[in-house]
Amino acid sequence: MHTKTIKELSTLLQTKKISATELATLFLDRIGGSDLNAFLHVDRELTLRQAAQADQRIASNDVTPLTGIPIAHKDIFVTRDWRTTAGSKMLENYVSPFDATVVEQFNAAGTVTLGKLNCDEFAMGSGNENSYFGPVKNPWDKTAVPGGSSGGSAAAIAARLAPAATATDTGGSIRQPSSLCGVTGIKPTYGSVSRYGMIAFASSLDQGGPIAKTAEDCGLLLNAMTGFDQRDSTSIERPKEDFNRSLNDSLKGLRIGIPKEFFGAGLAADVEQAVRAALREYEKLGATLVDISLPKTELSIPVYYVIAPAEASSNLSRFDGVRYGHRAADYKDLADMYKKSRAEGFGDEVKRRILVGAYVLSHGYYDAYYLQAQKIRRLIAQEFQNALLGPDRQCDVIMGPVSPTVAWDLGDKTDDPIANYLADIFTLSTSLAGLPGMSIPCGFGQGEKNGKRPVGLQIIGSYYDEARLLNVAHQYQQVTDWHLRAPA
């Protein structure tokens, strides 16, 4: 039962061949037997209470495609009954008095919450090793990272601990862990998913999205979690849509842009081999490969690591030990309490980004760093628009690798933050441009110890083109089985 897709489980639930309570119990038992450290808070009683409510809805035919489906939430979305820690000591025991909009939407659809998922502290990281509660292990190889910051979400789906999970993507944190764990994840267009109740890292970049086994499942989840929210000033006011409406459309005539910058130095041979094989499958499906150039891609890392820390420095100033969060036990005065509470509550990577952000926003450096980064960000977005938009557009979607390598070993990059930052080279530009992008499994590479580790194919589309991305991914998944493979 745990290997079935959301669509298959929904059919079983609505035909009453299994109950929501039975399904939730099955996944709770799997979570209890896992040693991946993917979950930070599980409350069996709360989950089974929600499952009983879902069974009542099914009995009265008050159902949606997600009613009774178990789901786990990245611990960056606040939840009324479960702890919300953002993977930090700063919020170690915090329980929110309200639900994030995304959580509200899934509750309204009748999903059953399994618990909260581990993540890099305040979503800052590429390997899920920055969590105060310890790293998540990659279920394909427990000596490897699962990717970050949504490593708990990707690992839970790969290990079949949940059929659905929420995640967030600031610079690639849905796509990169999905790639390293061999699952399917999509980051929608910026503003499509409400950020209300999502603990802020970089407000102009953060975007929620789903991780699941298949593109079809991701579409079902997106149907529930997107929509305008007046409580979020960055929320886009657009009518609701069915993201799975085009799943079965033919790919004949589809033009796939292949950026030469995505296949240069730094891309591991085993990753390139798997991605090239996937591109050949698309040619068999009737698509045409078009060579394009996105020369500003190489500037994505310096631009991102000016803008994101600047926004983080501002957003995290609220964690001062006064209203909520960690407060130092011993201090002399108010200023000393601030200093000690923040020094004790934040981890090294969060402190590093706060310091960088404060520096680039400081007098004398704002124009030299932050303002210049914003100008280059506009140029990066323009390159994508030239390729994907307008009558002279070069292609319909863009494809390439998600990560330059397969998952690396736990501990390999903990002392080298630059190496961690470089792991996001192919995902940052999409986030800076606010475009939708997704990762689908397309094969395996060799790990550090010659064990097989997953490779993901990245698909990037124009604004609000999620339905096309899901169609492109779904058609590939109809002729391959990478997305159905699970770790032993």
Image (cartoon, rainbow, N blue to C red):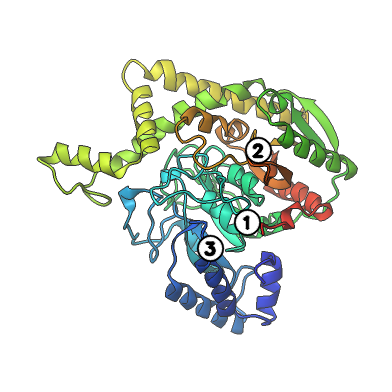
Q: Which residue is mark 2?
A: 402
Report how far apart the C-alphas of labels 2 and 3 lie in the structure: 27 Å
What x and y, as percent, mark residue 229?
A: 48, 53
| Residue 101 visible at all | yes
What residue occupies the far bottom of the structure in this picture?
59
Tell whether label 3 touches label 1 (CB within 8 Å): no
What x and y, as percent, mark residue 295?
A: 66, 20
Q: Which residue is mark 3?
A: 34
Report how far apart the C-alphas of labels 2 and 1 lie in the structure: 17 Å
Residue 369: quarter of image: top left
Q: In the displayed structure, would residue 460 be above or below residue 365?
A: below
Q: Closer to the observer: label 2 or label 1?
A: 1
Q: Which mark is residue 158?
A: 1
Location of the C terminus by quadrant is bottom right
Q: Residues within 10 Å of mark 3 (few under 14, many from 20)?
A: some
Residue at 40 percent of width and 52 percent of height:
133
Looking at the image, is mark 2 or mark 3 earlier in the sequence? 3
Q: Is residue 360 left or right of residue 28?
A: left
Nearer to the camera, 158 or 185: 158
What x and y, as percent, mark residue 47?
A: 47, 72
Residue 227: quarter of image: bottom right
Q: In the displayed structure, would residue 395 be above or below residue 245?
A: above
